[in-house]
Image (spheres, rainbow, N blue to C red):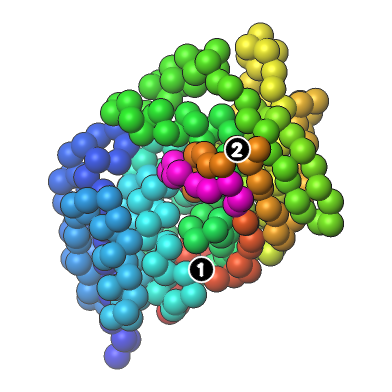
Amino acid sequence: MMEKRTFLFILNPISGLKKNKKSIEQIIHKEFQAHSTIDYQIQYTQFPGHARQLAQEAAAQNVSVVVAVGGDGTMNEVASSLVGTETVLGIIPRGSGNGYARSLKIPLNIKQAIRVLQYGQVKQVDVGKINEYYFFGVAGVGFDAYIGAQFQAFGLRGPLPYFYIGLREYFRYSYEGFTLKFNGQSLHVNPLLITVANTPQYGMNATIAPQAKIDDGILELCVLNPMSVFKAAMELHHLFDGTIEKVKAYRHFSVKEVEIERDYEKGVFHTDGEPRMGPKVLKISVLPKKLKVLVSGEKLKL
């Protein structure tokens, strides 16, 4: 007799554009009740950090797969508790950007994403670490971290509010100075943004590091210098068609470790789009193949 697999679905009720997650719960019941080899539970998050707590408890109980149902923020919380464990991360992407799921080619359609959970394969992938926090897609400082903080406080989700805030704040943003230490060199910059990428994109197909691979033991350090609003508008298509390297204001370096030191004492950084207040020095490194995640492939074997 085939051993039963155990799944825990963690749903964030406020992620993405649609607040009501009952329809997702109904789809999960419909698709999994017919699977006699799978036991599953569904739990809703009730406060920030709750997904991390639920995932940690599940890993301690040797649950086979913990599924993050939400956006990159929910994914980050869940995955952070699964690093270095045998419990596998599953994703049903329901956020605004879904950068991590898109990079892994996990379908945005709920039923297709469930098929990946039922019949996919386990892939071991790299994890980024910035001070005490994990990131799985991208992390960074500068304008995108600043916009992330503004977006979080704005209240409305989705691409339109995000782009509205970005355009509004582009005229107000004060460029910070940073010293980057990596690969035996030191570089001082006053950039628009600095992104350290484990996967190619932020979300919504905005590709900041087309050269990034999730399982090569390398992070991509991307620096984008300031541009006028007119120039930025002219170059924006490169961000969405995978040709950001053609932008003269852009450069990148392949690293395993990088230290980012601010000219000032502290400031905002982000991990997978979630803004955090950080100290003067941020130390970033890659942890090769420390997370197991379900992706499309042959029938699942655990």
**Regarding mark 1 in the picture, which secondary structure is present there?**
strand
Residue type at mark 2: give it: Tyr
Front: mark 1 or 2: 2
Q: Residue at x 36, y 33 (%)?
A: 152
Residue 213 lies left or right of residue 95; in this view the side is right
> Which contiguous range is marked in magenta?
272-282
- Secondary structure mostly seen in magenta is strand
Q: Nearer the viewer, residue 132 or 92?
A: 132
Q: Which residue is drawn at 84% across and 57% down?
A: 184
Task: Give whichever of discs 1 and 2 has the lower sequence position.
Answer: 2
Q: Residues within 10 Å of mark 1 (few under 14, many from 20)?
A: many
Residue type at mark 1: give it: Leu
Look at mark 1 in the image and give the residue it sits on.
Answer: 291
* Residue 264 numbered mark, or none: 2
Q: In this view, does 25 lie above or below 3?
A: above
Q: Which of 135 and 91 is in front in this view?
A: 135
Magenta stretch contains residue 30: no
Q: Where is residue 110 in the image (x, y as percent from the top left)?
A: 33, 47
Q: Quadrant of the N terminus?
A: bottom left
